[in-house]
Amino acid sequence: MAELLRVTVGELMENTAREAGEKEAVVYHDLGLRYTYSQFEKICRQAARGFMSLGIEKGDHIAIWASNKPEWLISQFSTGKMGGVLVTVNTNYRKSELEYLLEQSDSGTLILMEKFKDHSYIDTLYEIVPELRTCQPGKLQSEKLPKLKNVIVLSDNAYPGTFSWDDLLRDAASVTEEMLDFRMSTMNPDDVINMQYTSGTTGFPKGVMLTHSNLVNNGYSIGSCMKLTKEDRLCIPVPFFHCFGCVLGTMACVAWGAAMVPVEEFNPRTVLKTVQNEKCTGLHGVPTMFIAELNLLDFDQYDLTSLRTGIMAGSNCPIEVMKNVVGKMGAKEIIIIYGQTESSPGITGTRSDDDIELRVTSVGRALPHVEVKIMLPGTDQEAERGEQGELCTRGYHVMKGYYKNPDATKSAIDKEGWLHTGDLAVMDKNGYCKITGRLKDVIIRGGENVYPREVEEFIYQHPSVMDVQVIGVPDQKYGEELMAWIIPKENSGLTAEEIQNYCMGKISKHKIPRYIEFTKEYPMTASGKIQKYKLREQSKNVLGQYH
């Protein structure tokens, strides 16, 4: 087992540029943009000096609200050099959520794109801080957000009170390379360098503080599981603002000198076209992304023969989808990584040489230098192998804590340093884990515990089902009943009766959903996690028709 790396994000980038200088580092197929590692290192240093020219000190917070643009990538590694803490903002955020994040995170600088889909980010920001319209760039004095001073817009258009990205690069001239080198020399691998807000599948988002060491080592470890080399080219359509994109994606590539091939906004056709035209050897995605790609009517027209590896993660990976990614896409060495933002994010993973059965039925075993144990919920007792409990983890990958929220930190990380994930799991005798549900997702029907994952996996095997989510809904007789929300395959004519007949006699009667609804999509976080609490809210509105 390789030793843990003791370098900062900036040093990691520097080392890779030295070793893989002429290899491609960044390729934006649709933009025709290509950087070698030497060129990427140079532009990151220039942006780092640009941030310093704005008076941004080590430890100051820089929020970024944008899709997977080149400037996002440059910001990640340039802040890693000059010590600003990159605060990642969910692209789906609206006014109140953005205001909450900027205030809670004490961000002094905001980088944003003009708009995302039909949402004007610029208009939203002017609503929150109207003072921006009349101030000098860098001199914002806002009543609502007193810490916010600098706004940088990723656009060729000029906006009152803001800098452009070109301004940032131009102003780098006022900071010497020596000044940047000195700043880098003051940084420590254990410094916080990144802050990500939990997706908000429950309650208010919390700011997860992650260090250089968290991110660099998790990226390195993931790359090792994927057997990444300087010859690999990884297509990254998952959002950068989430750990999946900026650790399992970009950081893993930089740690191993592989090429990053980002897709700015997910579109299944764009992804397959990018893989084909750039001969990508790896592809990341959450299950819903892979489902969308596999179900394209012209899927067979794309040449995906270059694919070897990739990661499926972000939410439960249906077994059939995994088999199709291996069989139909040809990603024979694709792996599953399980984790969460609080663990930066990887905790366990399958390995590319695990047999297919292990890769479709488990989330693998502990990553190098990571401890995992299964605890009986509500006790300090470890579960027996094969017995269900809460998955807990300890090691270099555990966050520093939640920003300005010591109580939440204390309830997540116990006195011995174990992070309690809130996920239910079983571990086999070889250390391989299966995630069986969330502690909060367990449905208790008439005193019987039902785990939605088990029911979902069964229904998913029906040939007309594209995706399925099972939730618990209130019931007077049993306390809770099961409800299945199903996305049917196109023109399948699937009915609720057909699903119930399919389950009859094959799974226990108490596990057969009493209520079945069909939908075209699920409420999701931008990182691809299905928000079951929103499904429960939707369910209240439709349950009336059953009674």
Image (cartoon, grey):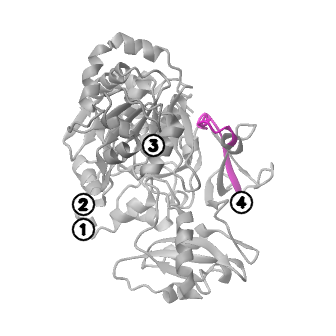
What is the quadrant of the N terminus in the image? top right
Q: Secondary structure at mark 2?
A: loop
Q: The residue under label 4 is which amino acid type?
A: Gln
Q: Are marks 1 and 2 in contact (CB under 8 Å)?
A: yes
Vertical arrangement, residue 246 with respect to residue 422, above or below:
above
Give the CA distance from mark 4 to mark 3.
28 Å
* Range of residues picked out in magenta: 388-407
The foreground one among 156 and 300 is: 156
Looking at the rendered structure, the kind of residue marked 1 is Asp
The residue drawn where x is 37% and y is 43% is 125
Along the line of sight, which residue is nearer the eye, 68 or 323? 68
Tell me which label, 2 or 4, sits earlier in the chain.
2
* Residue kind at label 3, given as amino acid type: Leu
Report the side of 9 relative to 420 (left or right): left
Name the residue at 59% across, 67% down. 453
Residue 393 in the figure: left or right of residue 11: right
Residue 399 in magenta stretch: yes
Q: Position of residue 89 (x, y in %)?
A: 43, 44
Q: Which mark is residue 298?
A: 1
Residue that numbered label 3 is attached to: 248
**Snapshot quadrant of residue 34:** top left
Q: Amino acid at mark 2?
A: Tyr
